[in-house]
Image (cartoon, rainbow, N blue to C red):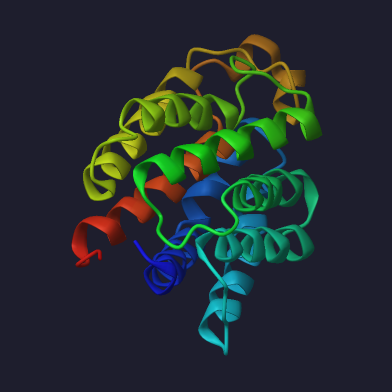
Amino acid sequence: MNTRETIEMMQLVAKGMVANEPALTKYDQAIGDGDHGLGIERGFSQVASYLSDDFSARDVGDVMTKVGTKLMSTMGGASGAIFGTLFRAGGKAIAGEKQLTSSVFARFLDAGLEGIYKRGGASEGAKTMIDALAPAMRRAYQLADVDFRQAIAEVAEAAEQGVERTKEMIATTGKAKTLGERSLGHPDPGAISMSLLLKFMAKYACTEVVA
């Protein structure tokens, strides 16, 4: 997937994330402050506008880095910092890449996850977006030699399975931490957002003719 296609993919992702605000708000109202969906909508609506204007990027890494910067400056709150870090750290790690291949994408997710670890201190199993991102990253490396269109679909599925596992976790960070065992049975909203990001990437990759 070249730079132009990566931009188009992120346009589809941004619009899809905005459309899912009501569902994300509902899930966050169950165990959080109820503002996660609004933050996602705010940040990704800005990304959608940003990419629709006279946007240009040197390479696929530059696309992701610029998306991360826009998220960090517009989304606000912990989500803005976390999702902004995912794209900024991941984008910088693949700077100069002209094609978004499976192996390049695995490096993107890996660096993004490492950036989030350093920024937030949460770990896998704490009922956060990491519980969707980490298994997705591992699956991406397993599929590093597979065609991107096939790989991204399976990476998205791994993230979705991670979301399901968060239902059985007790939150140990963020607002949900105060609920203790009452957080059981509810999926983590951040993990859902992470899963949706990959789902929309897969939707683009699997419906477009990728160079």
Quarter of the figure that contains the N terminus:
bottom left
Q: Is residue 200 above or below residue 49?
A: above
The answer, for residue 187, to whether it is visible in the render is no
Give residue 158's quadrant in the image: top left
Q: Residue at x 56, y 33 (%)?
A: 110
Q: Residue furthest top?
A: 181
The answer, for residue 116, to whether it is visible in the render is yes
Q: Position of residue 149 (x, y in %)?
A: 24, 50
Q: Position of residue 30 (x, y in %)?
A: 59, 33
Nearest to the observer: residue 30 or residue 160: 160
Q: Position of residue 19 (x, y in %)?
A: 45, 64
Nearest to the observer: residue 182 or residue 204: 204
Q: Residue at x 65, y 66 (%)?
A: 66
**Residue 172 left/right relative to 163:** right
**Residue 132 left/right relative to 54:** left
Q: Residue at x 32, y 44 (%)?
A: 152
Q: Is residue 98 above or below residue 189?
A: below
Q: Is residue 88 above or below residue 208?
A: above
